[in-house]
């Protein structure tokens, strides 16, 4: 499998651990990522100001991947939703596609409508598949309890996706957590937004939303997510949340590729844990009670 890896803006700047672990995991299971240096912002931040400009920005990126006959793999859920929505609209409306292409022609680009956009988590779940992923697990994370956070854009708006998971009662992340040997714990208001969408409008409400979600997760070793900005809300802002609401939350926030990589015997130092802002030392210490080192040597 080959995909154009679309990093977007937030991943390279704020969550290098996500990119590092995704690349390592992809290599481990036989997915080839192709980098396209010309990729730019997906257009998501521009949409409230200019829908047309946001669509142009997204379509430009789609055209770049299409030139190389590559489907796009995204890591950011907002990028996924933005690019997927543009594919959906342009493929449905030839008039709109012609209008956008007339503007793209000025820079020598054209969108034909021949590619797909998929989040890395979806590729793992749908294209690689649960059964194949299980075959790579060498160091089961038995005894760990993880809380999955799906976020808003991974499965919504549901009309632009083709039903690979239930947007109201999703299971894909839970199932991928469970193949590592860990338990995926349920918790109150699991589908609650991280608050990132209104951070620039009302910081207090945004942080309160993130705080409520973190408070609802009791007895879990970590939160597991698949979106860089959700990580910003739950991890980077955790200290600020504690200060503002007089709480004492100390919950590690991990990316799905990090725990999958650990279960497959990839050394933790190769999975970007040094960039996790809520330290994972005590969590990783549990692994030393297993035969992990012997397994890693053979991996």
Image: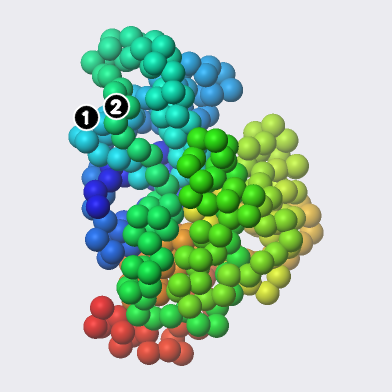
Task: Single out the residue that lies furthest toward the left.
Answer: 68
Q: Residues within 10 Å of mark 2 (few under 14, many from 20)?
A: many
Q: Are marks 2 and 1 in contact (CB under 8 Å)?
A: yes
Q: How far apart are the two marked residues, 2 and 1, measured between alpha carbons? A: 6 Å
Residue 190 x, y percent position in the rendering: 67, 57
Residue linked to disc 2: 63
Mark 2 falls on what kind of element? Answer: helix
Q: Nearer the viewer, residue 145 or 129?
A: 129
Q: Which residue is mark 1?
A: 67
* Image-quadrant location for residue 114: top left
User: Residue at the spot x=58%, y=22% of the render?
Assistant: 48
Which label sits on residue 131? none
Instruction: Measuring from the top left, give residue 75's x and y in whole percent.
Output: 42, 47
| Circle 1 crowding by C-alpha within 10 Å: few under 14, some 14–19, many from 20 | some
Q: Is residue 86 left or right of residue 296?
A: right
Residue 54 falls left or right of residue 238 = left
Is residue 37 positioned above or below 141 on the image? above
Q: Residue at x 28, y 64 (%)?
A: 29
Q: Do we see residue 135 in this rendering?
A: yes
Residue 245 appears at what percent x and percent y? 78, 55
């Amino acid at each position: 499998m080959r995909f154009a890896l679309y990093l977007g803006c937030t991943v390279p700047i704020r969550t290098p651990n996500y990119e590092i672990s995704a690349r390592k995991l992809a290599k481990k299971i036989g997915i080839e990522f192709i980098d396209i240096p010309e990729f730019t912002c997906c257009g998501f931040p521009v949409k409230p100001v200019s829908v047309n400009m946001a669509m142009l920005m997204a379509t430009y990126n789609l055209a770049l991947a299409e030139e190389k006959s590559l489907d796009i793999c995204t890591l950011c859920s907002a990028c996924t939703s933005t690019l997927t929505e543009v594919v959906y609209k342009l493929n449905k409306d030839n008039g709109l596609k012609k209008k956008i292409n007339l503007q793209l022609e000025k820079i020598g680009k054209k969108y034909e409508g021949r590619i797909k956009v998929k989040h890395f988590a979806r590729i793992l779940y749908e294209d690689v598949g649960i059964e194949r992923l299980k075959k790579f697990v060498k160091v089961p994370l038995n005894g760990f309890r993880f809380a999955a956070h799906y976020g808003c854009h991974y499965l919504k708006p549901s009309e632009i996706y083709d039903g690979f998971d239930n947007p109201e009662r999703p299971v894909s992340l839970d199932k991928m957590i469970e193949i590592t040997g860990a338990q995926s714990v349920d918790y109150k208001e699991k589908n609650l937004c991280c608050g990132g969408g209104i951070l620039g409008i009302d910081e207090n409400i945004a942080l309160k939303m993130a705080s409520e979600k973190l408070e609802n997760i009791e007895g879990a070793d970590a939160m597991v997510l698949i979106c860089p900005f959700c990580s910003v809300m739950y991890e980077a802002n955790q200290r600020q949340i504690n200060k503002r609401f007089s709480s004492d939350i100390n919950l590690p926030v991990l990316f799905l590729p990090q725990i999958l990589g650990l279960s497959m015997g990839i050394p933790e130092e190769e999975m970007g844990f040094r960039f996790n802002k809520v330290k994972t030392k005590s969590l990783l210490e549990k692994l030393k009670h297993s035969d992990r080192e012997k397994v890693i040597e053979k991996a």
